[in-house]
Image: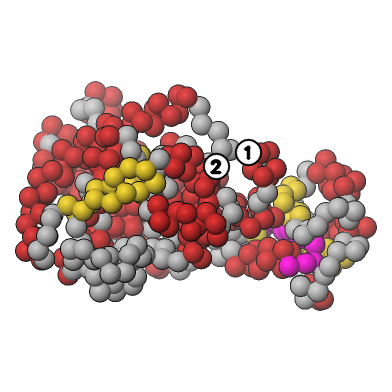
Amino acid sequence: MKRKLMILMGGDVLLALLAFYIGLLVRVGYAEARADMVSGPFGRLPLFVFTLFVVSYVLENYNIAKHRSKKEMVTNILFGGTVSFVLLSTQFFLYPDLMIGRGALIIAVMVFVFFQSFWHAVYIIGFDHPYLTERMIVLGSGPLAAKIGDLVHASRSRFNHMLTGYVSCEREAGGAVPEGAIIGHADDLRDIVVREKVSKIIVALSERRGIFPLRDLLTCKLNGIEIVDAPAFFEQVTDKLMVESMTPSWLIFATGFRRTAFFTVAKRGVDVVLSVCAMALVLPLFPFIALLVKLDSPGPVFFSQVRVGKREREFVLYKFRTMCQNAESTTGAVWAQENDPRLRSIGRFMRKCRLDELPQLYNVLRGDMSLVGPRPERPEFVEKLKEAIPFYSKRHFVQPGITGWAQVSFPYGASVDDALEKLRYELYYIKNMSPILDTIIVLQTFKVVFFGRGGR
């Protein structure tokens, strides 16, 4: 799925480049357009492409499952083109040296909207084409197999795949999947694969000892059939880890979880540069936010709290105060709830817009946090969660962040069950840390803030 999504996004980037050139071509002619593309102001073309891409991402134009209707898709793209034009016009007004001319800009954005609509329509048609459908079977008939089968069906709208049935194994405890969905026995695995035109086998055996069809699976593998186990398929489809099926040996031999010294240094360098730039942009807002906090309720403007960071070292985290003073004086440490009565009216707005998090840029500069990483939790909760959730302490092997994969993928957590679900995302992030994933998380954060999701 990620490969297909990258193709869709990459196509948009190429179309944006082409639209920019066509806008110049129509406005100033071939010779001047060609010269301008080569010797024009540096940054103008990247700004154009970047703005169109970010707006498309924030407006969820790459969420194909959401925009199955072509009419809805075109409407969203038209709205994105309008927003992009306004943003680009504003940026060109602020930085006149980058301007390409309003006429050329209008033409370029209109051309991009047309190209993007056509490209996304072609992509959706191809996405649903039967010849491109990935046919798969689940090896197993127990509870784990049933869970994976349900996941295949539930993710059909996001992935062009289908489950042809379950294959049972001798001496495996079955009964968890419908009898009519079992299409054969593991002894006939090779014949089943050929008959059903299967391209992927998902191994979902709760117990493999003595029943694992090693020879048949090896033959299928050498014949080009993809073989994945249940946790790997769960990760591919959900972008999180199946914590309850993880073992220490799985963690040891799993791909990922690798961070080179260069990546660590580069990530820290990006954190410092971006946090300094962000501080320069948001510092003028601090007096106004401070005034709102003071007018809303008596007490200090800033709020500090001990959190658990990398390697379980504690540090002091800073935020703008959003609750009444001494909110936990009678209750002790408790999670924030929906419509929390401790929140002040201005504080509720600040949490929705994430304005209360801005002082944490100072924590990033100090090295307590990163811009992207698992959210730091309070020590009182960490001790409880370590006892209740397996592998919970593994989230502390990386620097905590202002935003993270769990924050953009899951609503605000306020229970042990929520903490477990967030851990699935956090371990996925730790396993797959990369500059690309960090960039996706930052873009997703803009989208979450734009739509006001998740804050309490």
Q: Is residue 224 magenta?
A: no
Q: Secondary structure at mark 2?
A: helix
Q: Residue at x 82, y 70 (%)?
A: 174
Residue nearest the observer in this picture, 28 or 241: 241
Q: Counting residues from the N terminus, which is met first, the one under dot 1 or under dot 2?
A: 1
**Residue 123: x %, y % from top left:** 51, 54
175 sits left or right of 30 in the view: right
- Say which mark, if any, is on residue 245: none
Residue denoted by label 1:
255
78 sits left or right of 188 in the view: left
Residue nearest the observer in this picture, 109 or 42: 42
Q: Residue at x 52, y 47 (%)?
A: 393
Q: Secondary structure at mark 1?
A: loop
Identity, as a three-letter code, of the amino acid under mark 1: Thr
398 sits left or right of 159 in the view: left
344 sits left or right of 432 in the view: left
Q: Quadrant of residue 366?
A: top left
**Residue 397: x %, y % from top left:** 49, 39
Q: Residue at x 42, y 63 (%)?
A: 413
Identity, as a three-letter code, of the amino acid under mark 2: Lys
The answer for how far apart the CA atoms under marks 1 and 2 are is 8 Å
Residue 258, relative to residue 307: is it above or below?
Answer: above
Residue 278, relative to residue 33: is it above or below?
Answer: below
Residue denoted by label 2:
431
Residue nearest the observer in this picture, 435 or 84: 435
Q: Which stretch is magenta?
A: 130-143
> Does the image show residue 53?
no
- Disc 1 and disc 2 in contact, CB within 8 angstroms: yes
For label 1, the crowd category at 10 Å Cα-Cα, with few meaning under 14, some 14 to 19 and many 20 or more, is few
